[in-house]
Image (cartoon, rainbow, N blue to C red):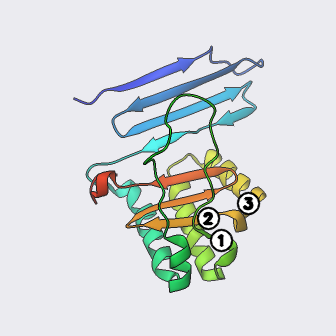
Amino acid sequence: PMNYYLQVFGEPRVDGDAPWGLRFEGHHLSMQAATVGCRLFTATPGFWGASPRTEPLAPMIDSSTTLWLSLAPEQQARAQVNFGIEGQDARPGPIQPQPALGLAAEEMDADQRALLRAVLAAYLDNMSAPIAADRFAAIEAAGVGAVHFAFRNGDFRVSGPTFLIDFVYHQGSRTHI
């Protein structure tokens, strides 16, 4: 059997300024949420995995592949970069920002930027509507032109000043995300 755990940090309240949060975690899933007086809310980091590939993740796979195939050869050359956790220092400590890798949205044509938005929408569709709307507003406020798309053998990364999405197949398997 698979085990899942719920952890609560602090004392859940709808008033006051005391921070509190929760984490729901188990095999192929890790979700966090934190709030301060119900005014400041975050739902990251989050991890969704699957083995075998499941339909909730299919829109992200399909939309990223469609975007990749829409790129001209010179755009693909800029978007095809090595990324992932290989060689990264995973010890506890301050979080270091990930570098912007791949092709910037400002280097894409209007149709390609629409496809990039489809990748983002497929990712945000896994969140509740208010959280997804808040996330998308933050992406737009930071500038969609600063969003980058990287692709490598079906794995992809979409990143911007306010977020990072890494979609990686486990050890090259097309069934273990």
The circle drawn on residue 148 is 2
Asked if the residues shown at circle 3 and circle 2 are in contact, with their CB atoms under 8 angstroms apart, the answer is no
Horizontal side, residue 38 vs residue 78: left or right:
right
Percent from the top left, x then y, of residue 148? Answer: 61, 64
The N terminus, quarter of image:
top left
Is the residue 41 above or below the residue 119 in the image?
Answer: above
Name the image quarter holding residue 110.
bottom right
Q: Give the Cα separation between the discs numbered 3 and 2.
A: 13 Å
Q: In front: mark 3 or mark 2? A: 2
| Residue ID at (60%, 57%) | 159
| Residue ID at (74%, 24%) | 37
Residue, disc 1: 105
Percent from the top left, x then y, of residue 144? Answer: 70, 65
Q: Give the Cα separation between the discs numbered 1 and 3.
A: 12 Å
| Residue ID at (52%, 65%) | 150
| Residue ID at (52%, 81%) | 71
Asked which secondary structure carries label 2, the reply is strand
Asked if the residues shown at circle 2 and circle 1 are in contact, with their CB atoms under 8 angstroms apart, the answer is yes
The type of residue carrying mark 3 is Glu
Residue, disc 3: 140
The type of residue carrying mark 1 is Ala
The circle drawn on residue 67 is none
